[in-house]
Amino acid sequence: MTAKFITPIPRPAIAAPDLVRPDWTGGELRDPDMLWLDKNENTDPELAKVVADVIAGLPEDAHNTYPESGPLYRKLANWLGLAPENLLLASGSDGCIRSVFEAFMSPGDTVVHSAPTFAMYFVCSKIYGLNEVCVDYLPSKTGPALDAGRFIAAIADNNPKLVCLPNPDSPTGTVMPSDDLRAIIEAAGEAGAVMLVDEAYHPFLSDTVLPWVNDYLHLVVTRSTGKAWGMAGVRIGYAAANPDLVRQLHKVRPMYETSTLAVCVFDRMLDQVAEMEASVRRLETGKEHFLNAMEGLSLRTLRGAGNFCHVEFGDDAGAVHGALADLVYYRQNFNDPGLAGFSRFSATTKELFQPVIDRIRTVIVKET
């Protein structure tokens, strides 16, 4: 049958040619025999077993019932030292981020954020037809640098409705010092903007502004369970803010924030906080071991504060990439200022990092 009629035209922001998403029909499953250090997931085998045991012990009705999230809200609030009314659950922390955009932003509004940063800030800005003001990281001897003064000036000069800053940021791994971050939050408040601080990598960076949400009524903090908690495949995250702001976010959430499976898994994992924290320590130890080895080969590194780090292989990059091709997935070929020439490796345990170190060493030692 010949196709009839025409494809309807979406709203202008969606029709814009510069809003392009990756091909959802492409891509392949990653090889299970390789080490997955390309997406900042938690690859700690000990925590993976804890999560797998939790999933195996889920109630029989977890797969065929809609979620009742109230108990999880109360349990999570108790752990965080907040009230349930401070919280929003979502399908990953990026679901929380999108809720902030949807609840507060109208076409033509201005958003200020860092660049480079988490890709969904760029995507959401385009989806909602916003005026995007990017404050660029600049190269420095210690890697990408974001000056708090320039960021505050961008807020003062552009009258934004929303200001976004992950801490630590990704892909840079950089951290905004607490005093500077407070100054940025206050500058956003003076501009009348919502301030979104993305803490997806907590507690790899233990510093947090979460206790400030009831003091700064414009502040939203978002967190992931895909990094420290080892639950990237479960897809659940949360946002925290003062109750009046959270009520606005709940107005735009779907009927159910996420799945029953996700709610049940996170509820049970909150009984395993000590295991999560032990996993973070193992991954930090592995990251330190890897970076020390790279620096021992006279390679430039960026340590960062998330569950990832960067290495610059320089003239040996081609040989190193070839040597690692059948061993490990990782991010190559950044083009952003401050990261050009670096490769990014997600943190893993000392034992899992060792074969990667050995393979790199064979190339660098031969070349030298």
Image (cartoon, grey):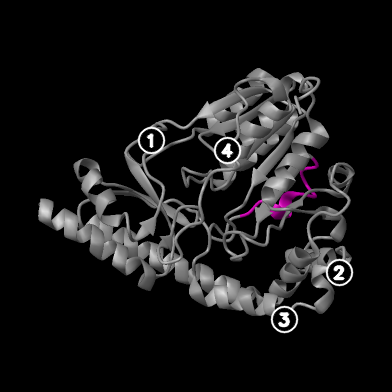
Rounded to the nearest angstrom, the CA distance separating label 1 from label 4 is: 28 Å
| Helix, strand or loop for disc 4 | loop
Q: Earlier in the sequence, mark 3 or mark 2?
A: 3
Q: Earlier in the sequence, mark 1 or mark 4?
A: 4
User: Mark 1 against mark 4, which lies toward the viewer?
Assistant: 4
Residue 226: x and y, percent?
Answer: 61, 59
In the rendered structure, which amino acid carries the disc numbered 3? Gly
Do tag 4 and tag 3 residues touch (Cβ < 8 Å)?
no
Task: Determine the residue positioned at 80% across, 25% down.
Answer: 106
Residue 30: x and y, percent?
Answer: 48, 57
Residue 166: x and y, percent?
Answer: 59, 43
The part of the chain drawn in magenta is 208-217
User: In which quarter of the view is residue 329 placed?
Assistant: bottom left
In the rendered structure, which amino acid carries the disc numbered 1? Gly
Q: Nearer the viewer, residue 287 or 185?
A: 287
Q: Residues within 10 Å of mark 3 (few under 14, many from 20)?
A: few
Do tag 3 and tag 1 residues touch (Cβ < 8 Å)?
no
Q: Is residue 2 above or below residue 346?
A: above
User: In this figure, which residue is indicated by the disc labeled 2?
Assistant: 71
For the N terminus, the image quarter is top right
User: In this figure, which residue is indicated by the disc labeled 3?
Assistant: 57
Residue 78: x and y, percent?
Answer: 79, 68
User: Mark 4 against mark 3, which lies toward the viewer?
Assistant: 4
User: Mark 3 against mark 2, which lies toward the viewer?
Assistant: 3
**Which numbered dot is residue 23?**
4
Prevailing secondary structure of the magenta residues: loop
Q: Is residue 202 above or below residue 4?
A: below
